[in-house]
Amino acid sequence: MALPALSIHLSNHGDAARTVEDIVLAESRGVRRVWVSEDLFHRGAMPIVAAALARTRTIELAFGVLAPQHRHPASMAMDIRSLREIGGDRIIIGLGSGVAERGALIAQPASPPLRIVDEAVSALRTLLAGSALDQEGVLHTSKGLRLTGASAIPPVYVAAVGPKALQQAGRRMDGVVLTMMCSQEHARWAAGRVAAAAVDAGRGQVPVVAYLPIAVDEDGAEARDRMRGVLGYFIARWSQVAFLSKLFLDWSELDVERMTRIREAFDAGEPLDELLPDALVDQYCVAGTAEECHRTIEAFAEAGITEIAFDASDDLDGVTALIAELQDGGA
């Protein structure tokens, strides 16, 4: 089976200058695309991507993802126009409704997430095309708003978890991003929803991107041990966020009681071996020897994933080396 496209994901939690250097290094090693996240209260993705575009020539830079609640569509359109003038057609826009629990910390009003994203996409496409924006939205209302000129419109991907968001992506978006902690079972279900909506809308294949944590080692058990800590971290943090906790409750053997035990053990620094067996690690992570990782990647491809963005925030060397090996057909 053909492998999906392979890219990397970098979080915005670390030093911004270091992230730019990582993108430059990734390009030198043949990586085709980098997804840069923008979680609230860390670093802004816009300046990171702008600096990286100025330092690189071929690598694509994707936002994974921006929240429309934090920026007026006109401001986003202006920034995107500038980024295209710096880096050409190497930009991909990723939009998502964000995490309400984080938005509440800045008094962000609760708004229908699907409508927020739909309105933002429509506004961006209208403004970048050089047309006047007349929109009465849940967040922003504009009458006759227009940029001073037109710009090519980059592909627009959206982050989606639930069925309605996935269907929206299949009907009218250029691609969809599945968040970290996307199990193989969830990937199959999500890709199926996107594909069905695309068919109903008379469209072709809509790309589906999955963020996946990865650890590769000659000792497969050692690689899984490393991923146990990553999986424990996400369960501990996401168990308290309603829609994110569903990624575990709906798609694994975990229940609320067991997730609470995992959170308590993780926060206390206790071993997670019994709470997070290898089978659960393999559901949510790419871990093991190079051969084992190759099989897991094939399984995600068979589930309908067209691009895997490996999280490389903590091991850029190892991840880029594996990508090069896989692309050369060496695994």
Image (cartoon, rainbow, N blue to C red):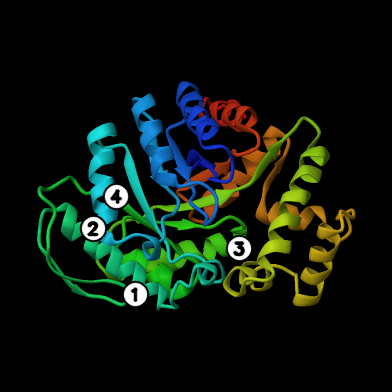
Measure how far apart labels 2 and 4 are at the Cα level: 17 Å
Q: Secondary structure at mark 3?
A: helix
Which circle, 2 or 4, is nearer the viewer? 2
Residue shown at 46%/74% (left/top)?
163
Which residue is identified by label 3? 185
> What is the three-letter code of the residue carrying label 1?
Arg
Q: Quadrant of the C terminus?
A: top right
Which residue is identified by label 4? 155
> What is the three-letter code of the residue carrying label 3?
Glu
Which circle, 3 or 2, is nearer the viewer? 2
Which residue is identified by label 1? 115
Measure how far apart labels 3 and 1 are at the Cα level: 27 Å
Image height check: is 8 above or below 122?
above
Which residue is identified by label 2? 74
Of label 4 and label 1, which has the lower sequence position?
A: 1
Q: Could you tell me residue 106's position as x and y percent?
A: 50, 67
Taking the image as drawn, is residue 136 in sight? yes
Q: Secondary structure at mark 1?
A: helix
Which circle, 3 or 1, is nearer the viewer? 1
In-front residue for pair 85/277? 85
Circle 2 packing at 10 Å, graded few (<14), some (14-19), many (20+), is some
Q: Could you tell me residue 9's position as x and y percent?
A: 52, 43
Residue shown at 53%/30% (left/top)?
22
Measure how far apart labels 4 and 1 are at the Cα level: 19 Å
Report whether 282 appears left or right of 297.
right
Report whether 13 appears left or right of 83.
right
